[in-house]
């Protein structure tokens, strides 16, 4: 996996006094500040610009790395590889999750990197975990060891097919309701519509209380698209004469008589989803953007998790002061995929 992305030598410490392009403040900076700049700024610059001189100051002579496949490499090998291979990604952001500095002049810098780029298949996102050991010599930090692990497969925009496949089907919260009286047994149906269109994946959605599926309390159309940067958007639309569409998910060609022009978008209610480290699609609406007047609310929020066998959805309404006025209070509804169609 090392050469899938040129990010496996995730070590960077530097003699800040001699680095090109580094602006030094008049007051000396703390070790933490220097280490953060190295990890978040200087190291990505060295790889993005194939700056072997900069990388040479970051890595100690005795530096060794173990990549995600268990391969070992030395400083000389890493410098040679960077010199020979231009980066094929568009951006790299590293989030430090551990930064410990010890009294003996040793530091551990670890965290998660997110790489985004574009291949012929479309935009992609790769995540990885990195742990680095650095030592301080004569006032300057350098890396002596780096280990990369947890590299996730590239998530392509084309993976919208996976997302919609997981969303389509019949789901029920019966299991959750059976063990917690705070939740109702709700049936959720999602069916593909207008499958001949290539602008998006369109889904018809119904939600109803079990035993009352002929009277759904929510009917929507979702337009699912990929933005090209690893983010998936599910825009929400309402239907004309929704009572005439009840049970349409059972049809061989649901809503065949309608088109997108017949729908009305719910502005601000789009759900934004991304792949997380566990392979799930996770996300929600944007802050207070989704206006709602239901039961005294001024806005609504949705938090969503999609996996192959379940959908977790936490829809809530809040008033102007941010107080919840409707929706589940304890957490998301958990809809498990049904083997057959709902009643």
Image (cartoon, grey):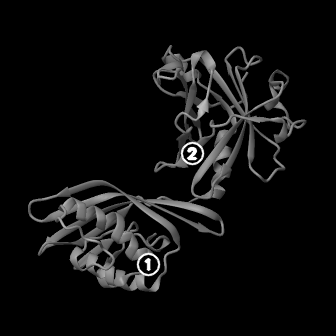
Q: In the displayed structure, does residue 296 sit left or right of residue 136?
A: right
Question: Which residue is under mark 2?
Answer: 273
Q: Spot the residue most to the right.
A: 257
Above or below 190: residue 69: below
Residue 163, labelled with which disc?
none
Q: In the displayed structure, does residue 316 sit left or right of residue 238?
A: left
Foreground pick, 269 / 108: 269
Res 145 quadrant in image: bottom left
Foreground pick, 32 / 142: 32
Please name which of the two marks, 1 or 2, marks the residue nearer to the observer. Answer: 1
What crowding class fits label 1: few (fewer than 14 Cα within 10 Å), some (14-19), or many (20 or more)? few
- The C terminus sits in image quarter: top right
Above or below 261: residue 61: below
Q: In the displayed structure, does residue 42 sit left or right of residue 213?
A: left
SS at mark 1 in the image = loop
SS at mark 2 in the image = strand
Question: Which residue is under mark 1?
Answer: 49
User: What is the x, y in percent for residue 13?
Assistant: 25, 71
Residue pictured at 84% horizontal, 50% vertical: 196
Residue pictured at 26% horizontal, 79% vertical: 57
Foreground pick, 179 / 167: 167
Above or below 313: residue 64: below
**Can I make out residue 271 in this image?**
yes
Above or below 188: residue 139: below
User: What is the x, y in percent for residue 207?
Assistant: 68, 25
Q: What whole-number distance in Å separates the C-alpha atoms at marks 1 and 2?
A: 31 Å
Residue pictured at 30% horizontal, 65% vertical: 37
User: What is the x, y in percent for residue 304?
Assistant: 55, 36
N-terminal-most mark, 1 or 2: 1
Q: Are marks 1 and 2 in contact (CB under 8 Å)?
A: no
């Amino acid at each position: 996996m090392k050469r899938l992305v040129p990010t496996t030598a995730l070590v960077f410490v530097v003699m800040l006094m001699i680095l090109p392009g580094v602006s030094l403040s008049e007051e000396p900076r703390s070790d933490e500040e220097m280490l953060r700049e190295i990890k978040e700024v200087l190291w990505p610059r060295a790889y993005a610009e194939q700056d072997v001189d900069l990388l040479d100051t970051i890595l100690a002579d005795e530096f060794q790395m173990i990549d995600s496949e268990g391969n070992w490499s030395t400083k000389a090998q890493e410098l040679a590889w960077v010199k020979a291979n231009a980066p094929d990604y568009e951006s790299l952001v590293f989030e430090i999750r551990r930064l410990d500095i010890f009294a003996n002049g040793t530091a551990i810098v670890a965290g998660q990197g997110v790489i985004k780029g574009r291949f012929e298949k479309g935009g992609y996102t790769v995540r990885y975990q990195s742990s680095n050991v650095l030592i301080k010599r004569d006032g300057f930090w350098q890396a002596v060891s780096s280990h990369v692990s947890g590299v996730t497969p590239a998530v392509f925009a084309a993976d919208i097919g996976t997302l919609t496949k997981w969303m389509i089907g019949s789901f029920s919260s019966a299991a959750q309701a059976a063990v917690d009286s705070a939740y109702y047994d709700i049936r959720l149906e999602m069916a593909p519509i207008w499958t001949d269109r290539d602008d998006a994946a369109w889904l018809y959605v119904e939600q109803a209380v079990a035993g009352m599926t002929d009277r759904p309390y929510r009917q929507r159309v979702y337009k699912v698209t990929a933005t090209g940067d690893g983010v998936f958007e599910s825009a929400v639309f309402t239907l004309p004469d929704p009572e005439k569409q009840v049970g349409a998910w059972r049809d061989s060609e649901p809503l065949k008589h309608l088109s997108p022009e017949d729908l009305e978008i719910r502005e601000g209610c789009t759900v934004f989803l991304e792949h997380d480290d566990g392979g799930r699609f996770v996300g929600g609406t944007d802050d207070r953007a989704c206006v709602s007047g239901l039961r005294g609310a001024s806005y609504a929020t949705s938090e969503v998790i999609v996996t192959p066998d379940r959908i977790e959805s936490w829809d809530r309404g809040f008033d102007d002061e941010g107080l919840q006025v409707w929706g589940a209070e304890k957490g998301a509804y958990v809809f498990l995929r049904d083997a057959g169609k709902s009643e």
